[in-house]
Image (cartoon, rainbow, N blue to C red):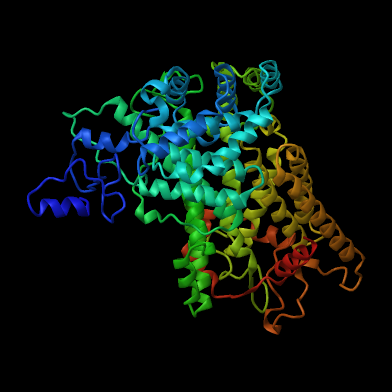
């Protein structure tokens, strides 16, 4: 209940319908009913939920919210002035759904395809038409702008025949949307959020993170003002059926919110921006893995009850939640977490909490991996004729992709999830690389160092192994056919950022223990990652810069290894990675740095399941010191960058 409603009801009087109080605290926004969400209600009238859900569904005609009709009409006039011919629009929309839609899934494909032609079919000079919904026009323009960026040579040829310069059209659209962004945001509609997400991701994936962050933040604020992060009071009684339209509208809200959530998490992870979303405030559901109601969500727009595109969105959103929790718990990318960390006087307790949090997060990540359906697991068996055929279909820019192109889309989604999963493994375990176990002597037969199942209990060595495995797994992706075909999609920069992270990880690990077998494996993986960056350079500014950085770091790695090779001071029978470190305390000079001989004595490394809280408590009978080799590697690489 709003403040205004309460004041009138105190006097047993209804709030006047013509009273606009959108500028007052607790007042109504112009043209919208008050948003009432009762989380404890057993049920709610469907019309109330429907009014809340349908305020800004793509293509639906409605009065703009929180903006005057004059402003909305003026905005729509400016936006409509950039609309290309209808056949040009069709080509660009088809390209968007071929190359971009599968990656962000911010709206329903069939709903959008049905709605956008109405812009051309309506007669705004007679009845206002789409002047009532400039938000959808802005979203439509962004779809065409992004589509033009990824148009195939075939589509470019068709556009040229129609007398359209895709570069000029794209530039005009981006400049206008950027100039009118505040007017669009003031609409307070779902389309306003979608426009912010599309513009923000475009900047993010094309080398402008400093613009992407505020634009996506603008979309976040509009989404929060619309309460997209909250559930709607849908009727729950079987006797009160929920219409397909209402379910579709509610589904659109969820799609939009999770797109905002994912992009904020990615920006924070990649560029260190602070997090603004509090998970404790959000109770919106994830998109269902498979819809229980008939809704068109396949590549070709056909009706189905088993929707794999929705499955991808479900698992990507769930993975983003794990990544966000990692940023908060392990990196302190929030004011509350940073404050709590600074108030902890006991460094031992802080380290225990760090290991406990990392273990719990890794457990969540492995559970996520276990639940992933086979269709969304990366196929590493080799080349697929279906995928090869699909690239031809996709390149034609038609609105009815073949079954082969569906396989192509599913493998692109699997590729995206695999990149994100391996990066999350590095993200979770990276903080533990700064430490190592150390004590006065080493005896692999001592029972307090080994668990009853003869597994090592050193969580720091385990984290180092996991980071190396994840980075090497990322490097292996580069040889898959689907990666070679992914450079023409919207996710190319997304892949480039994760490839760069894996490359930096292997540079560090190669420098920690030069002249070892693990170092050799890391360098081989680094070479593959540099080749991946080189392949992405033509479509990603991130990869242009990333490839240069990795090449410079690779030279430093090889130079350090050469210095180690030419250094004859250590005894030839002393393992390099067991040398005492001069600047460490005397009692810590014989740090446990596992060599091949020690590995054979201890048996295979544990899986993450073996690194439990009991393991952590048992292991802290030994001293923990800073991993000076890791610190020195970081210093050397930082100087090289």
Q: Residue at x 50, y 72 (%)?
A: 350
**Snapshot quadrant of residue 44:** top left
Q: In which quarter of the image is the C terminus?
A: bottom right
Residue 606 in sight: no
Looking at the picture, does residue 64 appear above or below residue 629? above
Residue 609: percent from the left, percent from the top?
Answer: 51, 54
Q: In this view, does 448 lie to the left or right of 261?
A: right
Q: Residue at x 57, y 54 (%)?
A: 269
Q: Is residue 484 left or right of residue 280?
A: right
Residue 531: percent from the left, percent from the top?
Answer: 78, 41
**Snapshot quadrant of residue 451:** bottom right
Q: Nearer the viewer, residue 104 or 421?
A: 104
Looking at the picture, does residue 382 appear above or below residue 267? above
Looking at the picture, does residue 562 appear above or below residue 146? below
Q: Residue at x 88, y 68 (%)?
A: 572
Residue 63 in sight: yes
């Amino acid at each position: 209940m709003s403040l205004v409603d309460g004041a009138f009801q105190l006097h047993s009087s209804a709030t006047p319908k013509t009273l606009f109080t959108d500028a007052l605290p607790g007042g109504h926004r112009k043209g919208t009913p008050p948003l009432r969400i009762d989380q404890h209600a057993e049920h709610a009238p469907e019309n109330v939920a429907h009014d809340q859900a349908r305020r800004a569904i793509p293509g639906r005609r409605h009065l703009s919210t929180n903006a005057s009709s004059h402003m909305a009409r003026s905005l729509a006039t400016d936006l409509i002035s950039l609309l290309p011919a209808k056949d040009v629009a069709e080509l660009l929309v088809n390209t968007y759904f071929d190359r971009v839609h599968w990656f962000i899934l911010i709206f329903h494909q069939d709903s959008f395809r049905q709605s956008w032609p109405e812009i051309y079919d309506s007669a705004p000079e007679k009845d206002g038409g789409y002047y009532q919904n400039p938000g959808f026009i802005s979203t439509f323009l962004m779809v065409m702008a992004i589509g033009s960026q990824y148009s195939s040579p075939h589509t470019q040829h068709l556009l040229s025949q129609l007398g359209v310069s895709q570069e000029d059209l794209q530039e005009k659209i981006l400049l206008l949307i950027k100039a009118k962004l505040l007017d669009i945001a003031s609409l307070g509609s779902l389309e306003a959020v979608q426009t912010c997400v599309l513009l923000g991701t475009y900047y993010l994936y094309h080398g402008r993170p400093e613009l992407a962050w505020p634009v996506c933040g603008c979309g976040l604020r509009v989404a929060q003002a619309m309460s997209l992060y909250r559930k709607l009071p849908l009727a729950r009684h079987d006797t009160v059926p929920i219409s397909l339209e209402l379910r579709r509208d509610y589904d659109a809200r969820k799609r939009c919110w999770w797109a905002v959530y994912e992009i904020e998490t990615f920006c924070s992870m990649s560029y260190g921006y602070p997090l603004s979303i509090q998970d404790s405030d959000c109770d919106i559901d994830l998109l269902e893995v498979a819809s229980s109601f008939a809704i068109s969500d396949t590549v070709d727009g056909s009706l189905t009850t088993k929707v794999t595109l929705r499955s991808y969105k479900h698992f990507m959103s769930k993975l983003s939640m794990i990544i966000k929790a990692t940023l908060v718990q392990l990196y302190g990318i929030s004011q509350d977490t940073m404050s709590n960390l600074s108030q902890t006087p006991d460094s031992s307790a802080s380290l225990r909490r760090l290991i406990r949090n990392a273990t719990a997060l890794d457990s969540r990540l492995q559970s996520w991996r276990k639940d992933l359906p086979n269709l969304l697991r990366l196929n590493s068996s080799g080349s697929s004729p279906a995928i090869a055929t699909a690239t031809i279909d996709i390149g034609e820019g038609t609105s009815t992709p073949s079954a082969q192109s569906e396989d192509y889309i599913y493998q692109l989604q699997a590729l995206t999830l695999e990149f994100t999963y391996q990066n999350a493994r590095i993200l979770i375990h990276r903080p533990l690389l700064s430490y190592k176990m150390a004590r006065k002597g080493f005896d692999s037969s001592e029972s307090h160092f080994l668990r009853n199942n003869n597994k090592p209990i050193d969580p720091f060595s385990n984290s180092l192994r996991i980071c190396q495995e994840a980075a090497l797994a990322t490097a292996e992706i580069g040889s898959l056919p689907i990666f070679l075909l992914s450079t023409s999609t919207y996710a190319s920069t997304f892949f480039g950022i994760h490839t760069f992270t894996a490359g930096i990880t292997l540079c560090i690990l190669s420098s920690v223990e030069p002249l070892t077998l693990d170092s050799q494996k890391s360098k081989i993986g680094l070479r593959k990652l540099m080749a991946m960056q080189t392949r992405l350079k033509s479509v990603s500014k991130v990869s242009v810069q990333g490839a240069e950085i990795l090449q410079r770091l690779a030279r430093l790695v090889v130079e350090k290894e050469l210095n180690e090779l030419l250094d004859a001071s250590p005894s030839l029978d002393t393992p390099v990675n067991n040398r005492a470190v001069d600047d460490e305390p005397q009692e810590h000079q014989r740090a446990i740095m596992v060599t091949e001989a020690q590995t054979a004595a201890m048996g295979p490394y544990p899986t993450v399941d073996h690194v439990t809280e009991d393991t952590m408590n048992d292991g802290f009978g030994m001293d923990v010191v800073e991993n000076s080799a890791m610190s020195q590697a970081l210093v050397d690489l930082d100087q090289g960058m």
